[in-house]
Image (spheres, helix red, strand yellow):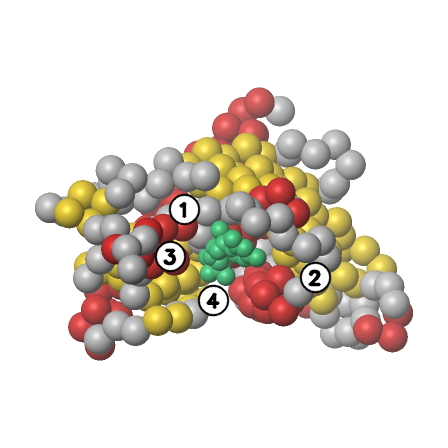
Amino acid sequence: MSGKSDIKLIENGVRLDGRKPDELRPIKMEIGILKNAQGSAYVEWGKNKAIAGVYGPRVMHPKRLSNPTESTVRVTYNMAPFSVEDRKRPGPDRRSVEISKISSEALSKVIETHLYPDTSIDVFIEILQADAGTRCVGLTAASLALADAGVPMRDLVVACAAGKAGGEVILDLFKDEDNFGEADLPMAIAPRTGEVVLLQMDGQMTNEEFEKGFDLAYNGCLKVYEMMKQALLAKEVQQ
Ligand code: CDP
């Protein structure tokens, strides 16, 4: 049977969307876009569109969940019903619970949570349009929103994925590469210390390919980090 899975994902070093193997999709970042959140950001990354809004540190509700030694970072990742081709059923599902959890863990690594015992820092990530890599886009938006809210952090969290498609190790997979490729390797780092705060992989790669993918994703994060710093500076200049 012939179908979309027969398409050549990469030919003569050029991907279906015209990118080179180590090229990121175009990225646009805007900070402070919501009036009612303490901090917010909008990130367009290829065809992905994500908004993040931050509240806190604020008194934790319900109180029994509060931690007397530090603030609790709670992330809610949500995909809008219209964000994907087949309407997504509204509300949480296993995937969104997983992405919320790994995002909370990644952000907790850089936030100075010990400064705010008994509180919560609530981060909401809304995916308006999805085209693979939304956990990275969402985390990047969340990190910018936290900075916008003035939440003390040791570092920003920066995320980017690499993977394998059409037999090649490539940076920042878009939907067709994610669907019909061999592997996806999302990563998030705290660039100042070089600490890896998220690393996941699905699919298959050899040891050598994994190492190449790791380096590609890491360097991709560093490029995104430069854009984040520029976006934050631009916001400061505006104020
Ligand atoms: O988005 P990310 O790559 O972080 O997570 P994923 O679970 O690997 O999903 C890859 C892509 O599949 C998403 O970005 C969406 O474009 C798509 N997807 C979808 O079409 N419908 C869903 N219910 C979930 C994901």
Closer to the eye: label 4 or 3: 3
Closer to the eye: label 1 or 3: 3
Q: Residues within 10 Å of mark 2 (few under 14, many from 20)?
A: some
Q: Position of residue 132 (x, y in %)?
A: 44, 52
Closer to the eye: label 2 or 1: 2
Instruction: Give amino acid for label 4.
Output: Val
Please report whichever mark, 2 or 3, sits nearer to the chain's N-terminal start: 2
Pointer 2 residue: 92
Which residue corresponds to the image point at 22% horizontal and 64% vertical from the top-left?
212
Structural distance between the alpha carbons of marks 2 and 3: 22 Å
Judge whether 35 appears above or below 80 on screen. Answer: above
Pointer 3 residue: 178
Pointer 4 residue: 197
Label 1: element kind: helix
Q: Position of residue 96 (x, y in %)?
A: 62, 62
Structural distance between the alpha carbons of marks 1 and 3: 23 Å
Pointer 1 residue: 225
Q: Quadrant of the C terminus?
A: top right
Structural distance between the alpha carbons of marks 4 and 3: 22 Å
